[in-house]
Image (cartoon, rainbow, N blue to C red):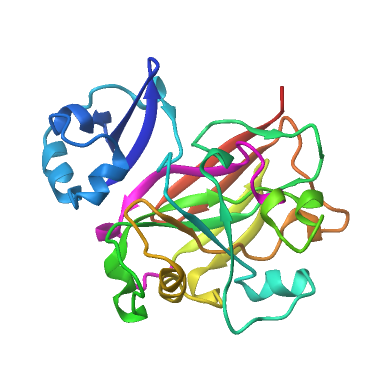
């Protein structure tokens, strides 16, 4: 099942993508859950699936503004330097432990929403990644049990303001500019992507392929990432783990390739879908 968060006529909602359009899960589930995060926390995905079965769509996809899949996650953990090619192109070394940093919720946008080039920089770079949405809470989760804690998967563009990222050794400033991280278009529930499924990730800029990798190329696996960050703090339903970008980022090309107004960036994951965002100047 494909689950989304959206805005329509000034109100926020959540729903399921069907062949005919969007089923409003707030209505279908008698307003028992405030949003998609609450649905996940209540372990009610199967209930939602039953509510959608045989139900006609409430409205078409093009009548909504897609929001980030989870608009207000409690935590957004982002794994850096998690593919060999990206480690090499950044002139770094593979580390025994994964590298993590945090993003904030309002650094994100949804499917089709514009990513702005901020006034402070022209060095807006793409980073296509696979996002994991946590369903079952836990602390110190064993790697062997990690997949049991996943609610679903989505596409993520961990877009980065490179010069601000390089101001210090702390990456936070370059990773948290307002509305620069794409998250969507939807969450594909974990029952549709069995544990250990090999996923293919592709990033395109204006239709040209810039990045390609598969999950078996990760240095630190999804299950290891879940185990690692859950040792730091309990993972909660709706938390997001962004699992790393492969080689081919714009900053390491010769000459560098920066996203500019008028561009369109796409992140595609087979078995999930395509996240597409236009690039604009910040007003």
Q: Position of residue 93 (x, y in %)?
A: 72, 80
Give the side of residue 228 with respect to residue 219, left or right.
left
Q: Nearer the viewer, residue 32 or 259?
A: 32
Give the side of residue 225 with respect to residue 235, left or right.
right
Image: 136 above or below 43: below
Give the side of residue 152 with respect to residue 29, left or right.
right
* Residue 164 belongs to the span the image colors magenta: no
Q: Position of residue 95 (x, y in %)?
A: 64, 81
Count of numbered labels shown in the rendering: 0
Q: Nearer the viewer, residue 219 or 77?
A: 77
Q: Nearer the viewer, residue 156 or 38?
A: 38
Q: Position of residue 81 (x, y in %)?
A: 65, 69
Image: 47 above or below 145: above
Question: Outermost residue, front direction?
Answer: 233
Q: Quadrant of the C terminus?
A: top right
Q: Residue at x 37, y 35 (%)?
A: 5
Q: Nearer the viewer, residue 69 or 103?
A: 103
Image: 156 above or below 178: below
The residue segment tinted magenta is 174-198
Image: 74 above or below 28: below
Asked whether residue 194 is in view, the answer is no
In the picture, residue 60 is in which quadrant? Answer: top left
Asked whether residue 273 is in view, the answer is yes
Question: Outermost residue, top direction?
Answer: 9
* Residue 190 belongs to the span the image colors magenta: yes
Q: Residue at x 70, y 35 (%)?
A: 263
Q: Residue at x 26, y 49 (%)?
A: 40
């Amino acid at each position: 099942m494909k689950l989304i968060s959206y805005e329509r006529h000034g109100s926020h909602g959540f729903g399921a993508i069907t062949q005919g359009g969007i089923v409003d899960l707030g209505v279908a589930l008698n307003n028992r859950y405030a949003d998609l995060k609450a649905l996940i926390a209540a372990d009610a995905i199967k209930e939602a699936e039953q509510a959608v079965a045989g139900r006609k769509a409430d409205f078409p996809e093009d009548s909504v503004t897609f929001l980030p899949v989870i608009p207000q996650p409690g935590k957004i953990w982002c794994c850096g330097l998690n593919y060999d090619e990206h480690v090499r192109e950044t002139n770094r070394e593979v580390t025994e432990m994964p590298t993590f940093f945090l993003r904030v919720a309002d650094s994100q946008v949804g499917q089709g929403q514009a990513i702005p080039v901020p006034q402070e920089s022209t060095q807006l770079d793409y980073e296509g990644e696979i996002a994991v949405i946590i369903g079952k809470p836990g602390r110190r989760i064993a790697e062997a049990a990690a997949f049991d804690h996943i609610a679903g998967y989505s596409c993520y563009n961990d877009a980065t303001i490179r010069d601000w990222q390089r101001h210090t050794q702390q990456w936070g400033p370059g990773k948290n500019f307002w509305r620069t991280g794409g998250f969507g278009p939807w969450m594909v529930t974990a029952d549709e992507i069995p544990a250990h499924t090999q996923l293919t990730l592709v990033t395109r800029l204006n239709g040209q392929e810039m990045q390609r990798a598969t999950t078996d190329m990760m240095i630190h696996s999804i299950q290891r990432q879940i185990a690692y960050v859950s040792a730091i703090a309990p993972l909660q339903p709706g938390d997001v783990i962004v699992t790393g970008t492969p080689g081919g980022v714009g900053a390491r090309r010769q000459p560098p390739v920066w996203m500019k107004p008028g561009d369109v960036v796409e992140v595609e994951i087979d078995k999930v879908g395509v996240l597409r965002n236009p690039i604009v100047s910040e007003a």
